[in-house]
Image (cartoon, grey):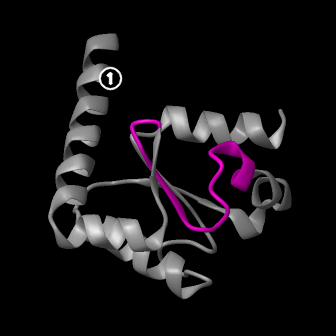
Amino acid sequence: MSALDRIDQAVKSNAVVIFMKGTPQMPQCGFSSRASQALMACGEEFAYVNVLGDPEIFQDLPQYANWPTFPQVYINGELIGGCDITLEMYQNGELQKMVKEAVKGAATEGDAAA
């Protein structure tokens, strides 16, 4: 599977996913740290991809959604943005609402499929 296919699979199979340098528990850059902290503060589970652990994803992710920097946050398959946008959305309460709705929607879809 190509890196772009793996990226696409991660985006489409998770209600909320962050592509970041490091992990939420051990971020490897300040931007990734702040964005993942904002997601954690929303109180819902989210997926993450450590771009430093996969050089192909690190190289190809900027082309996936035409966004050149890390981190990248996706909710319901759509790019929300990087650190600054994520923090701005958290500060105005929009991120919490989007994350909760996305996670709730994914759980509902899971129940319907069962």
List x then y, in percent, for residue 24.
48, 73
Tell me the residue at 68%/44% (across/down).
Answer: 64
List x then y, in percent, for residue 70.
61, 68
65 in relation to 58, above or below: above
Residue 26 can be seen, yes or no: yes
Identify the image quadrant of the C terminus. top left
Residue 114 can be seen, yes or no: no
103 in relation to 46, above or below: above
The outermost residue toward the bottom is 30
Bounds of the magenta segment? 61-77
SS for callout 1: helix
Direction from residue 30 to residue 86 in the image, left or right: left
List x then y, in percent, for residue 110.
32, 23
Tell me the residue at 76%/54% (across/down).
Answer: 57
Direction from residue 56 to residue 50 in the image, left or right: left
Name the residue beneath numbered marker 1.
Answer: 110
The verdict on residue 62 being magenta is yes
The outermost residue toward the top is 113
Task: Give amino acid for label 1.
Answer: Gly
Direction from residue 12 to residue 62 in the image, left or right: right
